[in-house]
Image (cartoon, rainbow, N blue to C red):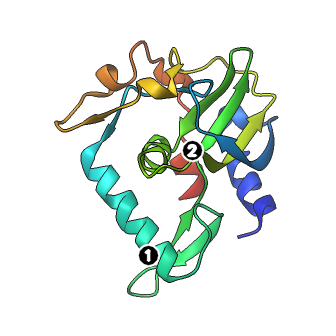
Amino acid sequence: MPPTELFQALARVRHYDRARFEILDLPLTEALRVSQARVKEFKLLQVADLIDELAVSHLELFTPCRYRLPGDSTSVITPPVVETTSRGLVMIEGHTRAFYAARQGMTHLKVIVAHDVKSALPVEPRPFTDLRLAHETIESAANMPGNNPSLMRNIENALHP
């Protein structure tokens, strides 16, 4: 999937209408901030399966692509999304993929960086190293303390209309 096509889809997100995008390899360090407190265990298992499938298909991890699913349907696979802010880079989408990568000893992760986002963040970010695994069902308010629903980015809706 050409990055320009992915960037056009992301520009449909209300808060990204004037943003600029690039794909880069981001260090997974405590300097990275996250917008969630926990990742869900079942999603972590899904990511592990996805990574196995990508390896079998010889696709680079989280390079933008359309992946053929059983039954001839396709799904868009994208890198996690981070935003540049005055407090550094903040992960908006892709927490489970980043968490998995860090647990596997990866030190960098391919991400989409959104520059020049004018909207406030939807939550108070925390250090990447504070991200934890949740074994139980968690409410959105507990996973994203202080979240403002009007500032949520709705990236999934833009990429999977």
In the picture provided, is 129 more to the left or to the right than 37? right
Q: Nearer the viewer, residue 84 or 74?
A: 84
Q: Position of residue 58 (x, y in %)?
A: 58, 80
* Total number of numbered discs in the rendering: 2
How dense is the environment of label 2, judged by Cα within 10 Å: few (below 14), some, or many (20 and up)? some
Name which residue lies at 32% across and 20% down.
Answer: 141
Name the image quarter holding the N terminus. bottom right
Instruction: Residue type at mark 2: give it.
Output: Ile
The local crowd at label 1, few if under 14, some if 14 to 19, many if 20 or more residues have their Cα within 10 Å, is few
The image quadrant that residue 155 belongs to is top right
**Label 2 sits on residue:** 155
Is residue 12 visible to us here?
no
Kindly identify which numbered label has been placed on residue 136. Answer: none
For numbered disc 1, what is the local secondary structure?
helix
Which mark is on residue 53? 1
Extreme-front residue of the structure:
105
- Give the side of residue 21 with respect to residue 14, left or right: right
Left or right of 94, for residue 136: left
| Residue 126 in sight in this render | yes
* Residue positioned 46% across, 23% down in the render: 149
Q: Earlier in the sequence, mark 1 or mark 2?
A: 1
**Image position, residue 161 (x, y; %):** 55, 58
Determine whether the residue tagged by mark 2 lies in a helix, strand or loop.
helix
Q: CA distance from mark 1 to mark 2?
A: 23 Å
Q: Identify the amino acid type marked 1.
A: Glu
Whether 83 is drawn above or below 97: the answer is above
Q: Is residue 43 above or below residue 30?
A: below
Q: Single out the mark in the foreground, 1 or 2.
A: 1
| Residue 135 drawn at (x, y percent) | 19, 38
Give percent across and percent down for residue 46: 33, 60
Q: Looking at this view, is 94 or 150 the one in front?
A: 94
The residue drawn where x is 59% and y is 45% is: 107
